Structures are given as structure tokens and as C-alpha cells.
Image: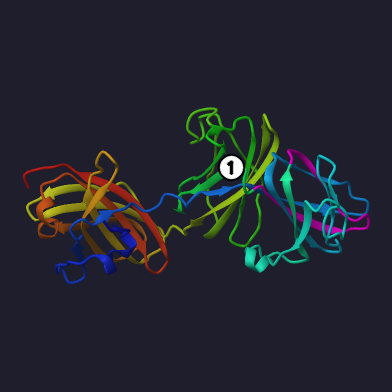
Amino acid sequence: MKTTRPALLASLLLASLPLAAQDSGGSFAPGEAYVPPAEHAPERVSRAYVRTVPLARDSAPIEVPSLGSARLLVWTVASGDAPASPALRAPGGRSLPSGAARSADGTVRRIAVDTTELGLGLPGAQEAIEVRAAEAGAYVIEPAAAAKGALTIVVAEPDSALTLAAHAGPLSRTDQPVALVATLRDGSEAVTGARVVARLASPAGRAGAEIVLLDDGRRGDGAADDGVYGGSVEGALEPGFWSVRFDAEGETVRGAFARTTSSGFMSEPGAAVLSKASATATADGVRVAARADVRVAGRFRYEVVAATTPDADGKQQGVAWVESPRTLAAGAQALELTIPRALLGDRASDALFLDVRLVGLDAPGVSRTTAEVAASKR
């Protein structure tokens, strides 16, 4: 069974019938599934963390925690006058001197890294330190005594059961609050009592202040103390793509940990915002009405996708779609279109779910709402 997203309907739907001259529409192919737009970007699951430390002459050693794993990887990225090849000491006493290729027993070694292949895109000297049979505890990184600049450290525990997964949503927003959600798991167990923060970076790359996420059941984080941490951002945001960095640190029975992951969302300029839509069954089909607050006059596309209501498994079948180009003036605007009965076919009398959208063509952006129409003998 294929899945179809509304943005791809024009190229994927097989059957169509002519409507009014300016409108277009069609029916889903038999068995075609309707999949709602994603509410947020896919969660990124991390077993690593990132830390940037400013360096000056006689900087103190830097401690990084590990829960212990078969393999620990430590990337160091130097900038400014900071030299590469810092020293590393493991909790059990193994050490890798500055500039050395490997430890005395060969279980700790230095590896050159091409950050282009890693997708890090970071300037300066890059290398990785691999620790085999890494024990739990604090690993100490010792920059050279005369180092100045900054050192970015990326620590990964590829085999660790402790993970941080996070997302920001909605994926595309206008006036809605941005939900920030992070989940900490140690295998199947929830990790509670951690400090979790998020930091937004604007489309221009400017990082904002830390936003503390809490696991108290009052911030879109599910139940209290379930290992899901939540927070939100409200108010106007600069249009464009915003990135979000999530950092978590805490302790388990095995020791201290830290994790970092990221997500992102698109802040739309909000040229127009739909209010709740309504649907009415008529002899001709289903009439769908909505109101829009148009903030920037211009060209738009008013579109509606009809699907079955979700079944017991939450799945929906596509039924029909209609789209209508409109030129709208600024201010409150009434929108209306009819999905012809001929397009609804055998589903014309069924209860239907309606995905209603107003798509900006001059000022790109999408405002979306939903409606339902009850089953009838129409």
C-alpha cells in the first residue's frame, strides 16, 4: 500500500475530474493511504555529547563523564592557538600523552579524522581518540599548558544503552508555540532527575539563552517522572529555519552521563492564518468553509484533502482532493469550496476527515486546520 502526503498529491493521484475553470481535483487511487503531515522533525537519538571549552594559559584539565562501554570515541577540534593532540587520562590510570599515537598498552590510540566525511564542518585541527574497553568514570583531557583559543570535544559511546532523543515542533509554525521535547532512556528504563536544556539558534546563526526542560507532567511532557522532559517557546520568531540543540546531564546507578542532540523547525512568515474550518454535506458533495486572517495580500492556494476517519489502528484511506487558487486582500477573508460528489465516489455517504490548508504562493508558508463531516444519506 502506498502512502501519500498532501504536498505530493498532484503528481501521485491517478484519477481526476474537471471542476470549475480555476480549480483542480481528483480521487485517490484504490488502496491509497492518507498520511497526515509530520508534526515535527524525526527524533534524533544520541549516544554522544558536545562541549566547547575556552582555553587560556594554564587552563585546568577538562573532565568528561562516561558510563563505560566497549568503545569510547573522543573527538577534539581545536581553534585559535590551541594545539592539537591533547593528553587523555582514563579513570583506571591508562593514559595517552600529548602527541603520542597510542598508550603503553595499545588500548588507547589517536586517529586522524576527516570532518568533511563526518559532516561536522568544523575548522581547525581534528583528531579522534579511541578507548577500548572503556571503564565508567571521569576521563580527563589535558590541553597544552600554553594553549589559547577553544577546544570542542565530541564524546561518543556507540554501545551505550543510555540515549537522548529530542524534537521540536510543529515542523512548520506561524503563531503557535514551539514545543521542545526530550526523552532520556537507559535501555527500557526512564532516566529521571536529569538537567535538560534546549537552546535555539536563529536562521542567522545567533544562539539564544538556555531553556530548561522539566519532567513534571505540565509542559507537554506526558506524565511526571517518566523520563520525558518538555518546554516551549512562544511569541514571534524571525522567519526561516531555526535549529535547536538539546543537552542533558545527570547520574544513573552506573555513574554520571552527558548527552547532546539536535532538531529544528521552520518559522513561517505567517502571510495568512486559517481559523477552524467547517464542512457541510450537500446534494453536490461536501462544502468546506473556513476563515482566514490574511496579513499579507497576494496569491494563495486553498486546498482540501478528504480521507476516511482513522480506524482502530489510526490508519486512514485517501478519498479525494480539491485545490483552488485565490488572490486575497489583507484582512478577514471567507473561503469556500466544494468537493464534488463524483470525486467522493463510494465514500460520498461516509464520515470523512478533512485536511484543510491555505498555501502562500507569493509569501511561502502553509496554514493548516482540520474538519470532519458526519456520515449521512447524502
| Color scheme of the displayed model | rainbow
Q: Main SS of the magenta segment?
A: strand
Q: How many marks?
A: 1
Which residue is drawn at the image coordinates 78% and 59% (left, top)? 110
Position of residue 41 measured from the top left corner of the image (x, y, whole percent):
47, 53
The magenta segment: 135-157
- Viewer-side residue, 260 vs 222: 260
Q: Per the image, is 275 magenta?
A: no
Position of residue 364 measured from the top left corner of the image (x, y, whole percent):
42, 65
| Residue type of the residue flagged with mark 1 | Thr
Which residue is drawn at the image coordinates 32% and 64% (left, top)? 8
- Viewer-side residue, 69 vs 214: 69
Which residue is drawn at the image coordinates 26% and 46% (left, top)? 371
Residue 136 sits in which quadrant? Answer: top right
Per the image, the residue denoted by label 1 is 163
Position of residue 265 measured from the top left corner of the image (x, y, whole percent):
51, 54
Residue 86 sits in which quadrant? Answer: bottom right
The quarter of the image holding the N terminus is bottom left
